[in-house]
Image (spheres, helix red, strand yellow):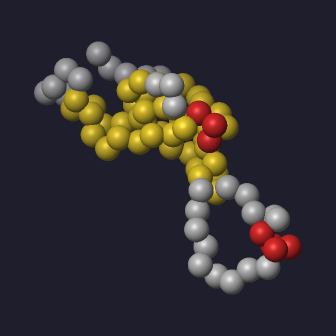
Amino acid sequence: MRKKVVAIEWGDAFIDTDDFEEKDAKKTKPVMRTTVGFLVCKNQHGYILATDEYAKKKDGYAAKMFIPYDWAVTVQELT
């Protein structure tokens, strides 16, 4: 069964190895990303997406992506 394709906009954590001051740290925001994939399922923690469905196997997928609910800003169904 073909899964829905969704676009999830979410705020990602990051690391910056440059020196900084506290005044600059107070302006720090998450890196905003948009990920598109097959919505395989949701669990108590978040969304599980896949980049590909494996056509020769009923429930086979490739490249699992997990996005916690608290990190998601928008979820848009594309198909």
Relative to 10, does residue 40 appear above or below in the rendering?
above
Q: Is residue 25 above or below residue 2?
A: below
Left or right of 13, for residue 6: left
Q: Is residue 74 left or right of residue 66?
A: right
Please give the name of the residue rendered at 74% of the width and 80% of the height, measured from the top-left corner: 20
- Residue 61: image x %, image y %? 27, 33
Residue at left offset 75%, top offset 63%: 28
Q: Position of residue 62 (x, y in %)?
A: 27, 40
Which residue is most to the left?
56
Q: Quadrant of the N terminus?
A: top left
Rendered view: 64 above or below 23: above
Question: From where the camera sits, is residue 51 visible?
Answer: no
- Name which residue lies at 56% across and 45% down: 34
Report if residue 57 is visible in the image: yes
Please state if 54 lies on the left or on the right of 20 as rendered: left
Number of numbered discs overlaid on the protein picture: 0
Q: Horizontal placement of 74 versus 52: left or right?
A: right
Residue 73 appears in which quarter of the rendering? top right
User: In the picture shown, does residue 61 fall above or below 31?
Assistant: above
Picture residue at 81% right of the left edge, 64% below the top: 27
Q: Position of residue 76 (x, y in %)?
A: 59, 29
Residue at the outermost right position: 23
The x and y percentages for residue 46 are 51, 32
- Outermost residue toward the top? 1
